[in-house]
Amino acid sequence: MSIDISQFFLVFFEEAEELLAEMERLLLALDTAAPDMEQLAAIFRTAHSIKGGAATFGQTDMTEVTHVLESLLDRLRRGEMAISPAHVDAFFAAKDVLKMQLDGHRHGAAVDQEAVQAVRARLEALSGATATCAAPQASAEPNAGSAGRRLRLGLPPLKREDIDALATELALMGSLSEETLPAGGALLLLDTAESVDDVLAICSFIINPSDVNVTEEEAQGYTAPDGSYGFFEPLPEPAPAIDDAPQVSAHAELPAVRAANAEKAASLESSSIRVSVEKVDQLINLVGELVITQAMIEQRCAALDPMQHERLLSGVSQLTRNTRDLQEAVMSIRMMPMDYVFSRFPRMVRDLAVKLGKKVDFITYGAATELDKGLIERIIDPLTHLVRNSVDHGIETPAVRAAAGKLETGKLSLSAAHQGGNIVIEVSDDGGGLNRERILAKARQNGLPVSDDMPDADVWQLIFAPGFSTAEEVTDVSGRGVGMDVVKRNITAMGGVVDIRSARGFGTTISISLPLTLAILDGMSVRVGDEIYILPLGYVVESLQPARQDVKDIAGQGRVVKVRGEYLPLIALHALFGIDARCTDPAEGILVILESEGTRAALLLDELVGQQQVVVKNLESNYRKVAGISGATILGDGGVSLILDVAMLLRGYGKRQAMEQADFA
């Protein structure tokens, strides 16, 4: 029977990407002035794990780079040399090269061999051990305080290619010889200065560590790679096999520690499973169809006599509860934390700040806030544009900030939080803020209709116009006028809204509001004439029937309604869509109070039908985009109902609200 080995390569690629991301996160948090040795050790472990995986799967180019990187990291973590910003920059460059090599193996992307060699030479120059690095068969530096040792590794019966792969990797740790056992196993003799747990970690790529019989003896005549012949102060007892294990003796308790380590690894493996996105999407689509079918059954059962069909109706009620629980569980699978997006910005901000000669303190809030995977991947590019613009245009240089009485280090924050049925993502900086006069002047130059008495909110929206840029010179960072219009277009396509708040000299905040998911939502069914519409429940505040004296007419502006001392714009849905409504008088109909982005309005309807879950179907891909409509759904009777775009409806009336409040306050 043939085995598809591609699945194992896929696991290696994904784990290597996770390790590279972890390496970058640790490097960004590293303080070169007062380095944390545990952080350095963690960075070393990521490089060590990548090297082991690459060697197992024959990615020798990655093995060579990680070997050089690992050797330098090992010397740093043992305090043989002081870490400097030059080391950190070299480690970032090595991480980028490893990512390039990984993409080359995974996607067939081009690999710049000159960049690879340049990084290797850079690491070798920093380590001062060019000869050692050039020979992969040489071992890494020995652990501080440990003498050379000989490890006898008894292996169970394995395939010849597995033994060869393991021997190749172990040979990087010292001098290796092999003996064949009569029972079909193998005995490897390894003279090394590495610890037992490091050796077992390498073995774990081929075989379960608990199946390896390890005994230790003093190596006779062993020469350490640095020529020290192992003349170091011996440790009173060896390092533990796992980080949180108690100290054990080398001979008596080591098998027990390995067994505990294997049990811990097994429990970790059983706690998660890798599933392709296609399978998750298929499951969500099936749950969506189940929700529609359940709504159809519930609607049919509503016409039955509850006394005669008590058991049937009880079963349908149980089906409704189970369907909702299933829908929530399946949707949670597709939800991903915003940290998936946020984690890629610290490195970008650091590099960009260095390039522009600025000091930036980057802070994130709400990284655990979850968003639908389909949206979280599409928000990356818009956020990248906004973060780059904040560093380039928003935050000033240290000299300018000092002259303005600010701290030389600017503050850039990225936050995410749930608000109702939406997620609000904000990019905020404490820079110079937007320049109203310059924006208006540039708008006039571009032929845009503007006036000097425009509200600030309208002026700020001008920066989203195509080709709009106030940069005095074009650089490789920004200034060509492309990007911000793409930001707004992409966010609008996701059903989101962009808002800007800025104060001259105090900074700018750009807020993005997105629906949590585009698949299934809780909605309120409402009737206007013979039509049924769906209102997303997250926007609904309350419903009421107003008194006639609370409704006021404004000449040329429409009507407003007084609700608890506040005048709200009144939106007549029948007039908006040209429908023959049963109730055109607000005092005879129903008003639903809606709120979005701080704007409130009252929607005039004929009646409320009910509340239900609806499966969102994309209207634009199946028909065309309709103003005021965000999608469609299938009702329980099989009919199609349109889902109202509440945010868009309220934006059209939000501009009038301030004036109406002033007239009737």
Image (cartoon, rainbow, N blue to C red):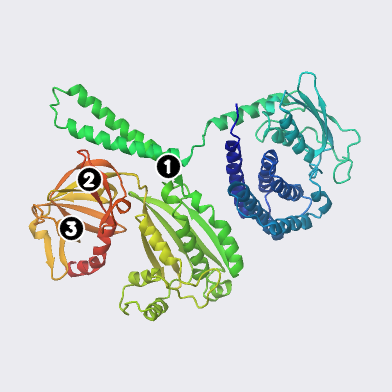
Q: Which residue, given by chain and number where applicable, does mark 1 sit on?
A: 334
As drawn, the label of residue 640 is 2
Q: Which residue, given by chain and number where applicable, does mark 3 sit on?
A: 577
Residue lying furthest front: 1
Task: Pick the quarter of the image with the C terminus.
Answer: bottom left
Q: Quadrant of residue 93?
A: bottom right
Q: Position of residue 21 (x, y in %)?
A: 59, 49
Q: Quadrant of residue 626?
A: bottom left
Left or right of 541? Residue 231 is right
Q: Quadrant of residue 563?
A: bottom left
Which of disc 1 and disc 3 is earlier in sequence?
1
Which of disc 2 and disc 3 is earlier in sequence?
3
> Real-space Cα distance between discs 3 and 2?
16 Å
> Real-space Cα distance between discs 3 and 1?
35 Å
Give the number of the mark in front: 2 or 1.
2
Task: Pick the quarter of the image with the N terminus.
Answer: top right
What amino acid type is highlighted by mark number 1?
Answer: Arg
Q: Residue at 37% of width from left, 47% of height from top?
A: 517
In the depicted structure, whether residue 224 falls above or below residue 118: above
